[in-house]
Amino acid sequence: MSLSDKKKSKGLRYGGAILFLFSIPLIVRGQYTLHILIMAAMNIILASSLRLVASSGQLSMAHGGMMTIGAYTSALLVMKLGISSWAALPLAGLAAAALALLVGFPFVRIKGIYFAMVTVFLAEMITLTAEHWRSLTGGSSGVVNIPPPDPLVIPGLISIDFPTKTEFYYFILVLMLVTLLFLYAIERSRIGLTLISIQQTELLSESVGVNTSRFKVLAFCIGCFFAGIVGSFYSQYINVITPRSFEFFFAIYIIVYMIVGGIKKFSGPIYGAFILTIFPEFIRALKEFQPFIFAGLLMLAIFFLPDGLVDLRRQWDKFYEKRFNRA
Amino acid sequence: MNKIKLGFFVVLGFMFVITVSQNTYAQEAKTLKIGAVFALTGPAAAGIKDCMDGVQAAADWINKKGGITVKGQQYLIEVVPEDNKSAPDGIVAAANKLVYKDEVKFIVGPVVPGLSMAMTPITEKAKVLRCKVNGTGNKAEMKPGMLYTFSTFMEIQYVRSVYDYFVKSYPNAKKIAITGPDEPGGQAMVAVAKKEAEAHGLKVVFSELYPFGTQDFYPMLTKAMAQKPDVFDLGVGIAPWYAGIIKQARELGFTGPMFAPSATGNIYLIPMLAGKDFSYDIFFLDADLKSPKMPSIVKEARQQVSNKFGVDLTFGHGAGWESLWCLVQAIEAAQSLDTIKVAKVWEKMKSIETLYGEGTMSGLKDFGINHVVLKPRPLSRLEKGEIEFIKFISP
Amino acid sequence: MITQSILNGLVLGGIYILVALGLTLILSIMGIVQLAHGEVYMLGAYAMYYLCVHAGLNFLLAILISAFLVGGLGVLLEKYFFRPFRGKMERALIISIGLILLLQNAVLVIAGGTPRAFASPFSGMISVLGVTLSLERLIVISVAFGLVLVLFFLIKMTKVGQAMVAISQDREVAALQGINIDRISSIAMFLGCAFAAVSGALVGALFSVSPFMGGFALMKGIAVIILGGMGSILGAVLGGLLLGLIDGVVPVYSTTHMAGLIGFGFIILILLFKPQGMLGREFE
């Protein structure tokens, strides 16, 4: 196979996959399945955007907090100022990115575990502010009756309403594909390469004149932008948000998706978020025993797949070969 | 002649087949799936798992008595239990599964107001009739337009009666401190309690919401005690919070009465957690369910729960039990499984049986919608660590 | 009111120090974020509940036994769960999340969700100059400072302690000097978990015991050691007292939310000027 053929087949595969994703609502009638897929797509955006932050060597636990910022910004803009939800969506992302920019420069001076913990405290402060500032946010009662997205009208052509999960599925699917494309482009660009070099040898990068903190802040801002966007989507989809909708453990789970999926490859967080979002739905019948299975899965993955679930195939081949040779 | 005979036999045979098939049809009970959503894992699971067991016990009890009969057709209840994982996204997933995968038309649960709020848009949209367990009365929990959401009770409706009892029993009390947890329910309760306290001639010298999950109440109590209140209203909450406030207030030297116009979830825990010496001059809308003064139906429920789960009936079991029982009564009153019809009949029901006596439908005045069961509730005192039943109050 | 609230703050500080001591030991020597430390603390409290209430043991004896049991569990956790991931923050994080899920739900299934309580033998109040303090709380502060002294002595005076300092400064150099890192990690984990058990016992007696009590301990413990500086005992003391005072005094003049905001804001501010906490060293 020549190189261009390979490229072609790769393109064909991706095209096929995207076509399949778009045709799912035609095959799957169940609204419940669609809901799970919507959640999976949401988590894929979150985990993938978090990976961008992590690729500069910083583990952010503020993604939940940034979703809170995005969700409140969009809900309050739509409900109090009557802005169109389609304008509120990017504004929510920008609000989160602005906060990330504000705290970014001082934060990136803090390294390792300290950085992770500072982001935990930031998220906690966001929650506390939302609870404290009752006149604006409604306090711990949160915001209810958040309207679904405004109808998407292309004059003279179509008008798309959001009455069922199918429309939301297409909404998040487009959002997810755009996000992934964007993140992939960044990874392949000079920024992505710089980030990786920062992660590997920060001192060296600094000595050859790379302004590392500027790149780290940039990664943090972009990551948080997408968290804000997802927060806005979540508020329009679920219709209710409270200061504790995206608590500490919510942020932790995004990290789990990213690491268990595999942080080294671009596809890692995608697999991780997808598998770990749909897996709990299969063990629902176990009720209070669900966490045991889930915890077991996490630990098995960490022990046996150091490079994450994406590495399963290669590890399995290795294991199989060993057995086969021995036999 | 032959033809007539043949025709006669054919008709007879046909009729026979119809009667037989109808008979077996009528005898063979169908199953009615009813979803139950409670926290089985996560922080809210502590204590709330009892509600799920209570629903299961009530289903067995109803099935044993013949299930639900709608227009001559017998239905046995099959409870579909779901875990809400104590989190908004957990309950949204559970609700979607119940509504769209199991295709249940009726759901009971949950308890926590914040989780209930997250679920309401889904059940309302799908026209699924839901009976939530308890509630405090936040505007977001129950309001006009929530056509398919009902509740077994709302705490704020009982605040006035409890204050009536208080001012009658403690005519010398003048200054009151009001607290509650900072969550949707706690907020609603403190707002109503403030109004009622003033209407009953008490001066509210302190009112504050403590964060969800507070353990150390010393800072808040120090601030409250500086105002020298005669009495504490503990608002809404769960046993560990009440017990924490009681123990720590007593340690800081408060000897006056304390009360909450709501249930504790498990009143036996209060003296256990706060210490017997500190559990005096306290009253709650709760009861020792083992007391001989409880109605016979409570005894039946106790029997049922201890047979099935080997434990003693708690308030949590009872709350779960009532949610299913009230829902079943509404279905039977409507003689229909159509949720629109059931909802229409339910909101007009004048009499509905509960564990503590006959109740009625209410809520039009407080919530703008007649979707709340109003029923007698037991008022009990804690004295020297013992629980004493006082009386049933109904607003 | 102000003296009482300062006293409340000191007691809270004592609680925070108790929780933070074990955590700072584990963090600095293992180089991991042990998020399940709160669950170890919870297990200590449950061990006390079973030993005191069900087995009817004496309170002090029960504390000793539960500290040894939970410390032993810590050794097992170190050997089978954390040893392969020493110094690998991300993967150890996932292991500790798995442990949180396992331990919380094991206790929820076995002991039930109902909160439990056990009484400490120290009942009674001390009232001086209009300020009140329960004996129980006095014990908490005393034990906190007692343990600080024990740990301080251990680190300054013993060979194991010196080895711990060496490891926390540079693991590779320490290994080159012939320090048995596995053994020292084991000891650190034993001590850290035993301390957690003791604090679980004392704080559990003060409040109540439930499968989810660990979350509070974890958040405060981490806040204290990040503020104080990882691996620094004096830092933990200073950080604990400062956060305790903030949480004890601010709510009296404002709200509890404000106390949280000021506390976390203060930590972030300190870190901006001293990225390793008040008394911490650089950590890789």
Image (cartoon, coloured by chain):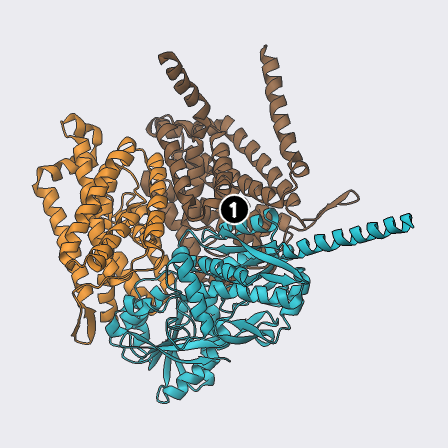
Chain colours: A brown, B cyan, C orange
Q: Nearer the viewer, residue C106 or A40?
A: C106
Q: Is residue C239 visible?
A: no
Q: Residue furthest right?
A: B1
Q: Residue at x 14, y 30 (%)?
A: C179
Per the image, label 1 sits on a secondary structure element best described as helix
Residue A289 place in picture, x, y as percent: 41, 45
Residue C25 spot, x, y in % from top left: 21, 43
Q: Quadrant of residue B128?
A: bottom right
* Amino acid on which disc 1 is placed: Gly
Q: Which residue is mark 1?
A: A228
Q: For residue A143, what is the image quadrant?
A: bottom right
Is C245 situated above or below B83? below
Viewer-proximal residue among A122 and C44: C44
Residue B374 position, x and y percent, is 54, 74
Question: The residue marked by circle 1 belongs to what chain?
Answer: A
Residue A244 seen in the figure: yes
- On screen, residue C154 versus residue C49, left or right, reads left
Compared with C157, B342 (above or below) is: below
Give the camera-side residue of A231 and A187. A231
User: x%, y% of residue A323?
Assistant: 38, 17
| Quarter of the rendering containing residue C115 | bottom left
